[in-house]
Each structure stands twice: as C-alpha cells, then as structure tokens.
Image (cartoon, helix red, strand yellow):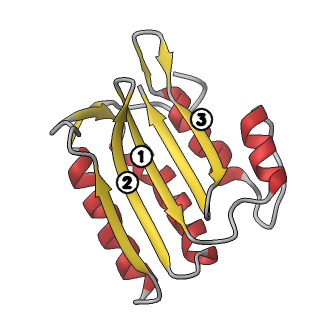
C-alpha cells in the first residue's frame, strides 16, 4: 500500500477483462474504429490483479486511442516472463516525444491533458507486486501509440 490508493488483488480472467474492454470500446467508438482483441494462446484462465484499478488504467489508454486513432484499436493480453502484459495499441501518430520521455524517466509532464491518467496507470502497475517484482507501464510509438501495462 502506497498512500491512499489501496490495491485489492484477486483472481480474475484476463480473457473476460479483454473482452469486456473491447465491448466497451466498440460501444464508445460508435462504429468509427475497427476494435480487435488478441489473446495469447498461453494466456492463463486466471491471473491475479486488481480488476477495478487495471480496468481504469486500460480505459484511460482506450480513451486516448478513441481520441487519436485513425481506424483501428487493438486490445491485447499476453504472458511475458511470467507476467501478464495488457496492451492497447492504435494506428494514430503515436505518443508525443515528451510523453514517451517522461514516462520512461518516471517524471510528470503536461500535454493536452493533465498527464494524470498515465501517472495513475504507472502507479496502478507499480502497486502490483509479486515475488519482489513490481508492475510497470511502458509506452512506445510503433506504427501508432502502444500502451503496455505489465503486471508481475
């Protein structure tokens, strides 16, 4: 527990989370975007995370994609190095360099918004801890904006 934000980790289905996020994204997009899901073949039936906080972080990334994507939003779940990796990617111009730099450095920034959504997503990731490993947030611009929430 870090300050007033508390984490409530329990067993949840990553499949159900991704499908629920995709359904919500389709509804919010009003047909403006193709919304895809990609679920890794080795994705476990159950993973341990705080569903409410993770969903909040992912929806923040999805809202960003809804604002900037050209035609496609992809919501993914995979396993990497034993951790759950949840990704939102779109076909926008990608994140501005100052956003990428500040998230990589762990410093706050100001852009069109307040930047609080990404700072909150990073905190949500870091609150997830397992066997001495903390979660992390990674952003990149690879043929669009790529938001990766890594949970140990």
Question: What residue is disc 3 on?
Answer: 123
Residue at figure coordinates x 58%, y 23% from the top left: 2
- Going from N to C along the chain, the mark reached first, 3 or 2, is 2
For the residues marked 3 and 2, what is the alpha-carbon distance in whole angstroms? 20 Å
Q: Is residue 142 left or right of residue 106?
A: left
* Depth order, front residue of 78/99: 78
**13 relative to 125, above or below:** below
Is disc 2 in contact with disc 1, using a CB cutoff of under 8 Å? yes
Q: Is residue 69 visible?
A: yes
Residue 138 in picture, x, y percent from top left = 60, 41
Furthest-bottom residue in this view: 31
Label 1 crowd bin: few (<14), some (14–19), many (20+), radius 10 Å? many
Q: Is residue 5 visible?
A: no
Question: What residue is disc 2 on?
Answer: 76
Q: Is residue 110 left or right of residue 29?
A: right
For the residues marked 1 and 3, what is the alpha-carbon distance in whole angstroms? 15 Å
Secondary structure of the residue carrying tag 1 is strand
Residue 128 in picture, x, y percent from top left = 45, 27
For the residues marked 2 and 1, what is the alpha-carbon distance in whole angstroms? 6 Å
Which corner quadrant of the image does residue 93 belong to?
Answer: bottom right
Label 2 crowd bin: few (<14), some (14–19), many (20+), radius 10 Å? many
Q: Quadrant of the C terminus?
A: top left
How many marks can you see?
3
Residue at figure coordinates x 48%, y 57% from the top left: 88
Question: What residue is disc 1 on?
Answer: 86
Secondary structure of the residue carrying tag 3 is helix
């Amino acid at each position: 527990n870090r300050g007033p934000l508390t984490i409530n980790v329990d067993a949840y289905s990553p499949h159900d989370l991704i499908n629920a996020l995709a359904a919500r994204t389709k509804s919010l997009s009003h047909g403006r975007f193709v919304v895809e899901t990609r679920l890794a073949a080795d994705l476990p039936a159950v993973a341990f995370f705080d569903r409410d906080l993770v969903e909040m972080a992912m929806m923040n990334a999805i809202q960003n994609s809804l604002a900037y994507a050209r035609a496609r939003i992809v919501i993914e779940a995979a396993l990497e190095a034993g951790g759950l990796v949840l990704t939102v990617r779109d076909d926008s111009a990608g994140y501005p360099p100052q956003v990428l730099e500040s998230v990589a450095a762990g410093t706050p920034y100001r852009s069109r918004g307040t930047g609080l959504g990404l700072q909150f997503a990073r905190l949500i990731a870091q609150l997830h801890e397992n066997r001495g490993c903390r979660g992390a947030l990674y952003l990149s611009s690879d043929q669009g904006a790529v938001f990766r929430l890594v949970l140990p």
